[in-house]
Image (cartoon, grey):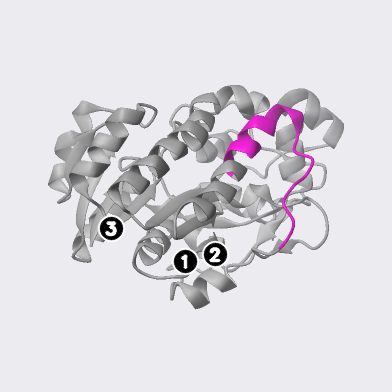
Amino acid sequence: MRVFVTGATGALGRHLVPGLVDAGHQVTATTRTPAKVDGLRAQGAEPVVVDGLDREAVITAVLAAAPDVIVHQMTALANAHNLRKLDQEFAATNELRTRGTDNLLAAAERAGTRRVVAQGHNFVYARSGGPVKTEEDDLDARPVPSAAQAMAAIRYVDTTVPQAVPEGIVLRYGTFYGGDPTTDPMLAAVRKRQMPVVGGGTGVWSFIETSDGAAATRAAVERGAPGVYNVADDEPAPVAEWLPYLAELTGAKPPMRLPAWLGRVLAGEFIVTQMTEARGCSNAKARAELDWEPRYPSWREGFRAWVAS
């Protein structure tokens, strides 16, 4: 198939593009950075430099590629590390998830592309009820004010893509890990004891290693009914369980523990809610309907391989 991949040089895209090429697909891969063109070409893709917010440029690129499938992985998160002011940090990504999504969907309509696979996140689930959510569970109706725009942008993708094209798929990824362990900001924070367990660490997180996320995305390119799918490993876990384990793997001292009120002062409301109220997600639907399973079924083995790399 002809596959048009946006955000092709991002954390997931760097695994997705060569995986699609190896599977025999003809891949057109976009980047906003001319310097990254040679790297995409070396992976076997046809590179295109395009800004996802430039509607006419996006439509022109998609029409030229005439894809059977469009994969929407556009973000601008490389330097977004201050989660205290999430909406401010995610402003560019929020626009890519709203206006950029609209541009891709308009291009899909013009090109006659029936299948669009887009990036979502499991942070959209309601922070109430059971600790592990399925795709049928309620979404968060009361997002933290400092993250309201970011959550709205994620939900925009979540609702718009399945409605706009005959085969619209949104993958609600767990929290990614697996980047360069020498420069990864989360590992750096853990090593410096700058990532504490807040308020008892009762928030439940679901993780997905980036190459596993790319494999699930490749599966959604090739098969699966329209709709939303959770893409995460098999073991949602509370912060109080996974964070000390990660610290131990890095050789750091155990993470500090802070009461929720102090966490709000130091890190902001969004971090506190994720540390104390977040809900994990079940990957049962993706396993069954996409015929996919993670190489790292648990963050335990995934973290170990990540840190060792």
Taking the spot 39% from the left edge, 70% from the top edge, the residue there is 223
| Nearer the observer, 231 or 257 | 231
Does the residue at mark 3 contact the one at mark 1 (Cβ under 8 Å)?
A: no
Q: Give the CA separation, mark 3 to mark 1.
A: 30 Å
- Does the magenta portion include 146? yes
Residue 12 screen position, x and y as percent: 38, 48
Residue 124 screen position, x and y as percent: 66, 48
Q: Which mark is residue 296?
A: 1
Describe residue 210's horizontal placement relative to residue 35 as left or right: right
Residue topped by disc 2: 233
Q: Nearer the viewer, mark 3 or mark 2?
A: 3
Identify which amino acid the numbered label 2 is placed on: Asp
Residue 69 screen position, x and y as percent: 32, 56
Q: Residues within 10 Å of mark 2 (few under 14, many from 20)?
A: many
Give the position of the N terminus as an image quadrant.
Answer: bottom left
Q: Give the CA separation, mark 2 to mark 1.
A: 7 Å
First along the sequence among labels 2 and 1: 2
Residue 274 screen position, x and y as percent: 71, 43
Identify which amino acid the numbered label 1 is placed on: Tyr
